[in-house]
Image (spheres, rainbow, N blue to C red):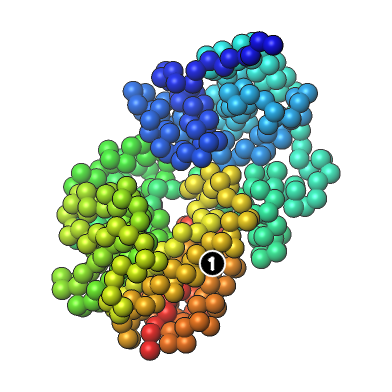
Amino acid sequence: MTKVRRKSTQTKPKNARAAALLALLDTDKGRFPEESLEEYNIGLHRRDRALAAALVYGILRHRTRLEWTLKQFLSSPAKSLDPVVLGSLLIGLFQIIFLDRVPNSAAVNESVNLSKTFGPPNSSKLVNGVLRAITRAEKLPDIKEAGFSPIKELSVATSHPEWMVRRWVDQLGIDEAARVLEANNQVPPLTLRVNTTRISRDDLAARLKERFEKVEPTPFSPHGLRIYGATGIISELPGFSQGFFTVQDEASQIAALLARPGEGEKTLDACAGRGGKSIALSSMAPKNSSIWALDPSRDQLKMISPEAIRLRLDPPRIIQGSLLENPFKSESFELVLVDAPCSNLGAIHRRPDVKWLKSESDIKPLSEFQLALLQAAARLVLPRGRLVYSVCTSTEEETLGVVKAFTAKNPGFRVASVIDFLPISTHPLVGDRETLQTWPHKHQMDGFFVAVFSRD
């Protein structure tokens, strides 16, 4: 039997659609889409880079709907296709449905070329036949006529796994859950945190308005700006080289405000990652206070000091290690921030790949790990100190479930109202609750949960 050999996908992409195809193939293997796009966009024109990103993120947002539509024109399931063939079809169909400025003929022809360049022999015939059949159809198949259950219909229409849909419906009801799902598929604005040690928010907004049609202050964070429309490469934005801003979602900015250090306080960012919150804390810290950043990943930590230097800030004190390994003496910090690894369901509008990377079985182990991190962090908090817990999600297990379990195990800590530590601009987010939960569909920011514990 002769083995069919696929053409190598290591060919350097010559255009946006080729870069998008290779990035999608990488994403299916678990690579972050932004990393793949950064690699494959090298040498492409700015417009091509923008189109490649639009294709990749658009397909990740709408993949279930696209595959269901393809299924109506295929004789075999979409997932049984060669990955290059399926990717070429998805790129073509996404343009046909969502990109009005791209003629259908161009969408079809470019996808055929992709399959010729990267796919198995003769695969271009299938790609051409399916996409031309779709363009000739009087109308696309209607999901509402498929006879699905309400959960299944929402899953296909909004391209979310059924388990996610079911959870939000159980938590919020079907109408509000639908709004969450729809918000997750909207392209969010770029949100900046202004480095107010270097420039005021109003002055940076004025500079950015010379280039962008719509720039507005974030309604809740006093340090944020939203930029709407295509922004291009971040490092080419006005003010980047001068250290006037960093990219940070408004919800993350608010979480950092809750961990703002006081006079003479020693603060630990215990799950620092790339240091977004550590650097935000450094920008707000009084001169006689200190910020420490802890994380097990050397690759993540090495990004912190260069970013702090770009912003003309004193870098946090960086320690590589795990909070669970107890790298500090007990009762070492007035404030500890645990921005814990989580299911990331609150960041889907920025990271649509989360929909396909996470499973429902991840949630229980994550909540157990989060509780273990809080337990370890509690030992480091001085009497009358604070412990701040944040996650970018909304699941019961990872939010109030962790809070309840932690307070049951640690009677020396009490839940303090987050409103006591936040500026007035943020108070509408909190209402009469002690903890904070933000939502993309309500607040146009990531879905973040934050709780503050005070030690007796």
Compared across the picture, whether 290 is left or right of 149 comes to left
The residue lying toward the viewer, choosing from 327 and 448, is 327
Q: Position of residue 131 (x, y in %)?
A: 67, 20
For the point 67% across and 25% down, the residue is: 81
Q: Position of residue 83 (x, y in %)?
A: 60, 26
Q: Position of residue 342 (x, y in %)?
A: 50, 59
The residue lying toward the viewer, choosing from 77 and 111, is 77
Quarter residue 203 falls in: bottom left
Q: Position of residue 323 (x, y in %)?
A: 37, 66
The residue lying toward the viewer, choosing from 287 and 410, is 410
Quarter residue 267 falls in: bottom left
Which residue is identified by label 1? 368
Q: Residues within 10 Å of mark 1 (few under 14, many from 20)?
A: some
Give the quarter of the figure containing the N terminus: top right
| Local SS, label 1 | helix
Question: What amino acid is found at the position of numbered circle 1 in the picture?
Answer: Glu
